[in-house]
Amino acid sequence: MQNERGIVLGIETSCDETAAACVARGRNMLSSVVSSQIEVHRKFGGVVPEIASRRHVEAIIPVIDQALNEAEVTLAGIDAVAVTYGPGLVGALLVGLAAAKGLAFAADIPLVCVNHIEGHIYANFLAHAELDPPVLCLTVSGGHTELVAMHGHGRYEVLGRTRDDAAGEAFDKVARVMGLPYPGGPALENLARSGDPNAIEFPRARVEGRPLDFSFSGLKTAVINYLHTSEQKGARIDYPDVAAGFQRAAVDELVSRIGPCVRATGIRKLAVSGGVAANGALRAALGGLVAELGIEVFCPPLPLCTDNAAMIASAGYYGLAGGRMSGLDANAVPGARLEDVSSEGYGSLS
Ligand code: KG4
Ligand code: ZN
């Protein structure tokens, strides 16, 4: 880093949030601007990729300007640009990448491409100054559900991941069939508050031969079948009970994998991240693990749980410190996996 302050400008456009942020030395958040498209996509019940790309194009420059202004820096005061290259929607990712490359070229500063899941993990390093690897990371969002042992900065071992739907996706799909607005997670949690989590027993999944993997599609189907069967019979449906029963099963599915991971790795710190980490029932269940497993649980504040660019800037800072840098020919990788970060670095991006 040329500059004493080590400021990285982070850019995130992988889904429906246009975000930019300035972070000093990977930990000190100087600004974090998030322009959400939720209202635009709500009437379609989910993110429409083409609309998302167009909105990113409109928002990206004003959002970057605002992030620089709020951090009270100009482009000349930025040391590097970090940008999400995947996983995500290809058209959406390309908007952030094009902006990041343009700025890195114009300011003649390094560009570093960041994996979005890695970004979510780094939200915890922004929020908890005392946190350092090794740490277990549970990343639960609309697009991914991963349980990762982070052995050092940029060194990840994926212990388990979902075989089908992501946790947030299951919340969103179940919410949708119950007529709740998009995004379904917060709406479903809200409805579940007035329900009895033990009134309806929904199934928990086990993935044959892969005990640390997750599966949410069976649970989602069980809820949908329950609703349809009740409707066909003309039975009264207690929606808060359905929401609470689903949420309990989903939270159980997530939390039940933690003990085996702690025992297998000996790592006694758990960092939770991603949009579903905003869920109060999940936070409460994880809190219960502190005494049960003798571990420390870290969770970022809500604005850092969901998509933001400060987490990308933080991951980018540590990536650069570890010698990673991307060329101006870096491309979006919609299906990027966390394993690619440690095994091949970013040099292989074409
Ligand atoms: O991390 P995020 O903002 O975007 C992705 O990278 O996917 O996560 C969004 C997801 C959505 O599926 C949303 O429904 C879910 O996080 N979510 C929640 C809650 N708040 C957001 N799920 C359950 N309970 C919540 N309170
Ligand atoms: Zn995300």
Image (spheres, grey):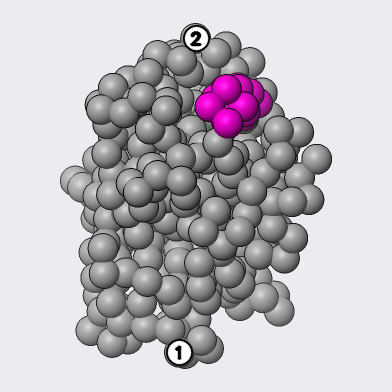
Residue type of the residue flagged with mark 1: Gly
Q: Which residue is mark 2?
A: 58
Which element type, helix, strand or loop, lies under badge 1?
loop
Is 51 or 151 nearer to us in this picture? 151
Q: Residue at x 51, y 86 (%)?
A: 265
Mark 2 lies within 8 Å of ligand 1 (Cβ measured): no
Return the x and y of residue 135 as percentages of the image width and height. 43, 74
Residue 157 is at least partly visible in this image: yes
Q: Nearer the viewer, mark 2 or mark 1?
A: 2
Where 117 sits versus 41, above or below? Answer: below
Residue 259 location, quadrant: bottom left
Q: Residue at x 32, y 34 (%)?
A: 32
Q: Which residue is mark 1?
A: 266
Where 199 sits versus 83, above or below? Answer: below
Where 283 sits versus 143, above or below? Answer: below
Which element type, helix, strand or loop, lies under badge 2?
helix
Position of 143 compared to 90: left or right?
left
Q: Callout 1 environment at 10 Å: few (<14), some (14 to 19), or many (20+)?
A: few
Mark 2 and mark 1 in contact? Answer it, CB < 8 Å: no
Return the x and y of residue 76 as percentages of the image width and height. 42, 28
Return the x and y of residue 156 as percentages of the image width and height. 58, 68
Alpha-carbon span between mark 2 and mark 1: 47 Å
Q: On the rendered image, what quadrant is the C terminus found in?
A: top right
Whether the magenta-drawn stretch holds residue 104 is answered as: yes
Residue 252 is at least partly visible in this image: no
The range drawn in magenta is 94-108
